[in-house]
């Protein structure tokens, strides 16, 4: 018997693939100009603050140098990304050997993991979502990914991060 969350995740992957998400992720595999919009970088990345509408409210969130919203994956640990396979194609890791912060006061670190030099903010590994555009948040609460905010509490806490925006169904109906 299949697990209900796997079925839901599969349906979500199919929906995003239908709108070109997989193609966008595949095109972003290198370090070309397209990498600036996907969050991938092998040298440097800037994590900065920006504004976006999240769950109907304008929020200050963390974005990459291209203005794409940054997310964290709730099941990750401070040292291990659990985002692999098809999910990793939809949620590319923000990677950089030397990340910088602009307007974000949290601690940036680099974790060497399956994605390379993955950037973490207050211990939360960061990702982008292939269906997002600058200033647009479409992945909030989908598949346990949440928008990263400047007040995102360090991962060492045993409770939900204080800066996390509560999960609500996204405009595409994938929330669960």
Image (spheres, helix red, strand yellow):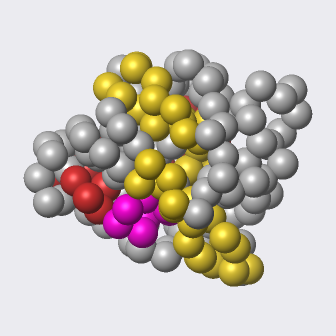
Asked if the stretch drawn in magenta spans residue 66, the answer is: yes
Q: What secondary structure predominates along the stretch shown in magenta?
A: loop
Q: Is residue 168 left or right of residue 140?
A: right
The image quarter in which residue 30 lies: top left
Q: Residue at x 25, y 40 (%)?
A: 43
In the image, 52: left or right of 41?
Answer: right
Residue sitting nearer the eye, 126 or 46:
46
Horizontal arrangement in the rendering, residue 22 relative to residue 79 (left or right): left
Q: Is residue 16 above or below residue 79?
A: below
Q: Residue furthest right?
A: 159
Q: Is residue 46 visible?
A: yes
At 44% across and 48% down in the image, what residue appears? 100
Q: Quadrant of residue 18?
A: bottom left
Q: Nearer the viewer, residue 168 or 17?
A: 168
Residue 157, position in %: x, y? 83, 29
Task: Identify the residue shown where x is 41% and y is 54%.
Answer: 46
Q: Is residue 16 visible?
A: no
> Residue 134, percent across and down?
42, 73
Q: Which residues are magenta?
A: 63-69
Compare residues 36 and 90 and report the one nearer the observer: 36
Instruction: Decide whether residue 127 is among the magenta residues.
Output: no
Question: What residue do we see at 66% from left, 46% from top?
Answer: 106
- Whether residue 26 sits left or right of residue 155 in the image: it is left
Residue 154 screen position, x and y as percent: 74, 35
């Amino acid at each position: 018997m299949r697990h209900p969350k796997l079925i839901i995740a599969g349906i979500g992957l199919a929906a995003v693939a239908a709108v070109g998400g997989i193609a966008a992720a595949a095109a972003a595999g290198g370090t070309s100009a397209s990498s600036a919009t996907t969050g991938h970088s092998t040298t440097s990345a800037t994590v900065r603050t920006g504004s976006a509408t999240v769950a109907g409210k304008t929020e200050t969130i963390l974005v990459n140098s291209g203005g794409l919203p940054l997310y964290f994956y709730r099941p990750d640990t401070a040292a291990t990304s659990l985002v692999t396979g098809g999910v990793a194609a939809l949620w590319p890791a923000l990677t950089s050997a030397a990340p910088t912060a602009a307007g974000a006061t949290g601690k940036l670190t680099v974790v060497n993991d399956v994605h390379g030099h993955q950037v973490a903010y207050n211990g939360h590994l960061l990702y982008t979502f292939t269906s997002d555009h600058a200033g647009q948040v479409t992945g909030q609460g989908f598949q346990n990914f949440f928008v990263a905010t400047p007040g995102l509490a360090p991962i060492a806490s045993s409770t939900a991060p204080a800066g996390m925006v509560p999960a609500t169904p996204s405009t595409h109906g994938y929330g669960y």
